[in-house]
Amino acid sequence: MLKTEYYESSGKYPLNREYKSRLFRIVFEDRKDLLDLYNAINGTGYEKEEDLTITVLEDAIYLGMKNDLSFIIGASMNLYEQQSTWNENMPLRGLIYFAGLYQAYVKKNQYNLYGTRRIRLPAPQYIVLYTGSGEKPDRLELCLSDAFIPAKSGQLPCLECKATVLNINRGHNRNLLEKCRRLGEYSELVSCIRAYLQKGKAVEEAVRLTIDECLARGILVDVLTRCRTEVMEVLLTEYNEAETMEYLKKEAVEMGLEQGRQQGQDRVNRLNQLLIAESRYEDLKRSSEDTGYQEKLFQEYHI
């Protein structure tokens, strides 16, 4: 089992103590399995489990980071996150998470930020394992700098954060999924439940059938046998959340487009298109109801 260090970056965020780990974290809760995952992704050969230190930012729940896996090994500080929905804001979320991790790292090691000697830090590595239904390449990078509004003076931004996205859906990154068998089995479980949902099965039935099929095929048997009830609860929560988000997305898009049609304003239509492109569905819905908030968004996008 993982020996975890709980980092509290600032202590000012409200914590959800009832929060349950996601399936991805349950699957890789054993230090050996996480070490295998790291080696497979990075082409390294770490064998000693004690070389890996798990770090968890408790208030990341507040930030919506889902608290997947963060750990230090060698000279690197790693954040591994599983994503079933595409999100262009991953680099920004990664920046926020790493800021908290480094703040906690400095505090834990009693380093002096105002001292004259340079503090040596483990280098950040941000890996996103993508299991969404949208078609994506095996590997791509999302950069925080792509989100910056160009400065008129031509000044270069002083910040960067890169999220390396690895598509682990069936048929993608075969070599990686073969190197890390557990990741390959996790990918198969996700593919299985998606197949049942596409056949029109209700979420609860799809989850039950998926677990039965995976057990029969020898997929994640240890996890599904040891904590079947917990896995069912986690999967039901995750897929019900996804279903709810899809509904809200559809509702927000319809409201925004309807407002644009009624008002017939290029300005409104342009704003709606930008918000949809960035998956800002809550902002889209709010702007269609609140003209004051809409005006703020106009200013934000310089429309």
Image (cartoon, rainbow, N blue to C red):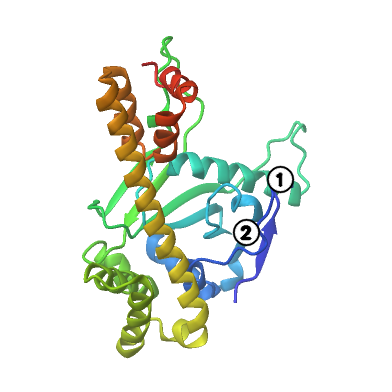
The residue shown at (46%, 56%) is 81
Residue 198 percent across, percent down from the top left: 23, 67
Q: Is residue 243 left or right of residue 31?
A: left
Q: Which residue is mark 1?
A: 106
Q: Amino acid at mark 2?
A: Thr
Q: Is the C terminus in the top left, top right, bottom left or bottom right quadrant? A: top left
| Circle count | 2
Label 2 sits on a secondary structure element that is: strand
Closer to the camera in the image, 3 or 13: 13
- Within-10-Å neighbours for mark 2: few <14, some 14–19, many 20+: many
Q: Relative to 287, say whether 124 is above or below.
A: below
Residue at the extreme top of the image, as rendered = 153
Residue 77 percent across, percent down from the top left: 55, 52
Q: Amino acid at mark 1?
A: Val
Closer to the camera in the image, 262 or 10: 262
Q: Which residue is mark 2?
A: 55
